[in-house]
Amino acid sequence: MERPYNFSAGPAAIPPEVLQQAAAEMLDWHGSGMSVMEMSHRGKEFISIYEQAEASLRELLAVPANFRILFMQGGGLGENAIVPMNLSRAAAVDIVITGSWSQKSRKEAAKYCSQVNTVVSNEADGHTSLPDPAGWQLGIGSSYVHVCTNETIHGVEFHSLPDLKALGSDAPLVIDFSSHVASRPVDWSRVGLAFGGAQKNLGPAGLTLVIVREDLLGHALPICPSAFDYKIVADNQSMYNTPPTWGIYIAGLTFQWLLRQGGVAEMERRNIEKAQLLYGYIDSSQFYVNKVAANCRSRMNVPFFLRDESRNEAFLAGARERGLLQLKGHKSVGGMRASIYNAMPLAGVQALVGYMREFEQKHT
């Protein structure tokens, strides 16, 4: 049976090859007589899965040797609390507000830090642009600067990371790259810590990825739970408590799938092609509109609106009939949203554009 195209923002599509391999190994992983879900996280079988996943990810993202890779739980939202508990020293932090997720980051940081500085905000234009870093008002002596590099709900993306040193700041840059991890290269020379939930581009919900520079370990606040202290997690190879074993396994298969496709460079090429096709059609249409400034449109999450929103339900119903799923926009902004992560093939975007064209012609 031909599978539909799943445009969900997360939990999102997983490559069919990965799902097929997981299905084949479900009852008996490599002759062990066990499913991965039944294994001890300290047994030799799972340790081999973990080590392969970590090595594949380090290769895939070109993670330097002075960064530690942590497989944790709590999701991106949880990291909004875990990061300040590890890095803030209870002092001031800087937050760049670009949408719903960075707003949540500001709210969480305020619980643990003496001061939370809003470096800049795009709230006034409905989170449809990205302020030029040259105009950011960075704090003096801030513990870190937090940036959500892709806002899943509003569809804005930093296509290059800010250079804090060029802006006169020695603070480490913390990036939430949940919704575009592995879709493009990371300039690690500009990053102190990167985190992201796996459920958008890497695997199932429940696994959280943290990549942290070694010099940032060992500074957790006394109130930080031991299971969320980055140094303790790093010293215990992500196994201080029972890790999300199934999520690590599926993520490891996904890392290997990405490497077989040609790695991050090839993913970026494909993602640019998919995004250009979809945005190009929207911009050429009088029926649909995307409100995000062209220079910061997300390659992963494409929000769009029907100019006549009374047709929304008919549009969604027709899409479902054609196997185009999960296109309804986030409840906070409405409209439509197509999430076109790494696992979404070009054919899926072509099918969506074809349906959008057909719907437009039928209703004009």
Image (cartoon, rainbow, N blue to C red):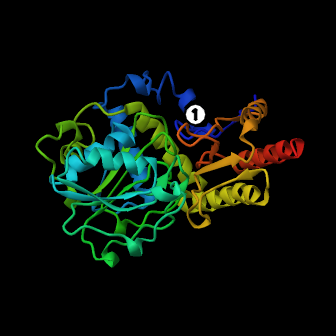
- Placement of 26 over or under 162, stated as above or below: above
Q: Could you say which is closer to the camera, residue 249 or residue 151?
A: 151
Residue at 60 percent across and 32 percent down: it is 20
Residue at 26 percent across and 60 percent down: it is 144
- Placement of 273 over or under 333, stated as above or below: below
Q: Judge from the rendering whether residue 6 lies leftward or rightward of residue 233; answer left or right.
A: right
Name the image quarter holding the N terminus: top right
| Residue 248: % across, % down | 41, 38
Judged from the image, the secondary structure of the residue bearing numbered disc 1 is helix
- Placement of 159 over or under 31, stated as above or below: below
**Which residue is under mark 1?**
19
Q: Among all residues in the image, which is located at the extreme front?
A: 124
| Residue 76: % across, % down | 38, 43
Q: Judge from the rendering whether residue 173 lies leftward or rightward of residue 99; answer left or right.
A: left
Q: Could you say which is closer to the camera, residue 227 or residue 252?
A: 227
Residue 326, quarter of picture: top right
Residue at 38 percent across and 39 percent down: it is 75
Q: Judge from the rendering whether residue 10 lies leftward or rightward of residue 38; answer left or right.
A: right
Residue 181 shows in this picture? no
| Residue 198: % across, % down | 45, 42
Residue at 62 percent across and 51 percent down: it is 302
